[in-house]
Image (tube, rainbow, N blue to C red):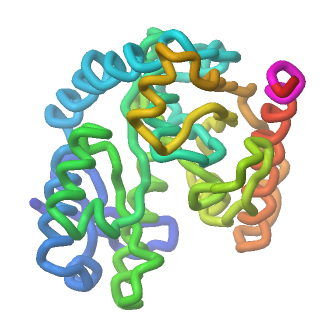
Amino acid sequence: MTELTVKTNSDAIAPVDKTGALVPTGGEIDKLTTTERLGFRLMHRMNLGAAKRLMTFCQRHIGSLWILIATYNIMNVFGIENVENSEIDKPLILVANHRSFFDLYTVSSVIFRRTKRPVTLYFPVRGKFFYDNPIGWFVNFVMGWFSMYPPFFREDREAMKREFDKYSMRRLVQLCSTGHGHMIGFHPEGKRNFSDDPYDFLPAQPGIGKVIYAARPQVVPVFIAGLGNDLPKQIMGNWTGGPKIRIWFGEPIDLARFYEKGDRIRTHKEIADFLMSKIADLGEQDRNKFAA
């Protein structure tokens, strides 16, 4: 990578490549293993310039097509106009509940198929498996066209790898701050909820609040129900009368009152909790329409 430099909000110098994308410092990337460094460099490159445009083309015309074929009989979508009418040149974060591996991929396929809005997708992901294993690289390619980026290693047992997460946070804030058609999928819960009750939610994690406080993007809540983790069963349900998939897009969330507060973890958690309350509101609409 050709490195330049740019000042961050704290006046520290952060390296950027020739495209203007933030890159990790030598001290940060050195904390990763050789395989993780190779994985990161591959994913970073595939999320820039012509490579990203090609991957986006494949997402729109190939990835979304197979999801459409696998769900067209059971798919129900509400409020898609809230995405269609969002600003194109201001990044949009989709905050959704998390119950299956396929939540945001299904959501993105609906957006590609049912809106004309330019979309450039990014899905922050745990670095474990998707970046430390070539099989994970392949899964990132076939499932997300390399859009599972940037990686976070916060749950890695080797604490030194968390140093790299400082870069990933800077890069994520950059993606959420500027970019034509940028759309970032995020699960405030931080992990999948295995409860049998689709209207049950895990506590929100403050990380999403930190990103939003720094980036000030557009934010649209999303509630998803009817998706499972058994892919063959999910696909067969499209023709055998499986559970209806329901995707609800809420109105853009006004977070201005939180931006008047201090930039601290308490504020970040309040933002995250507020986002989950908006997702829960959509869940109540779903309960009223489908639970009976």
Q: Residue at x 39, y 34 (%)?
A: 232
Q: Residue at x 33, y 16 (%)?
A: 65
- Percent from the top left, x then y, of residue 67? 39, 22
Q: Is residue 106 above or below residue 102?
A: above
Q: Residue at x 15, y 32 (%)?
A: 50
- Percent from the top left, x then y, of residue 141? 22, 43
Judge from the rendering whether residue 190 lies leftward or rightward of residue 70; answer left or right.
Answer: right
Judge from the rendering whether residue 14 lies leftward or rightward of residue 99; answer left or right.
Answer: left
Residue furthest to the front in view is: 240
The residue lying toward the viewer, choosing from 76 and 172, is 76
Q: Is residue 259 something one can see in this rendering?
A: no
**How many marks do you count on the picture?**
0
Magenta portion: prevailing SS class = helix
- Percent from the top left, x then y, of residue 69? 38, 14
The residue lying toward the viewer, choosing from 213 and 157, is 157
Q: Is residue 19 something one can see in this rendering?
A: yes
Q: What residue range appears in magenta?
A: 285-290
- Percent from the top left, x then y, of residue 106? 47, 29
Judge from the rendering whether residue 263 lies leftward or rightward of residue 229; answer left or right.
Answer: right
The quadrant where residue 255 appears: top right
Is 26 one of the magenta-colored residues? no
The quadrant where residue 81 appears: top right
| Quarter of the image that includes the N terminus | bottom left
| Quarter of the image that includes the C terminus | top right
Q: Residue at x 40, y 88 (%)?
A: 157
Q: Is residue 195 above or below residue 146?
A: below
The quadrant where residue 105 appears: top left
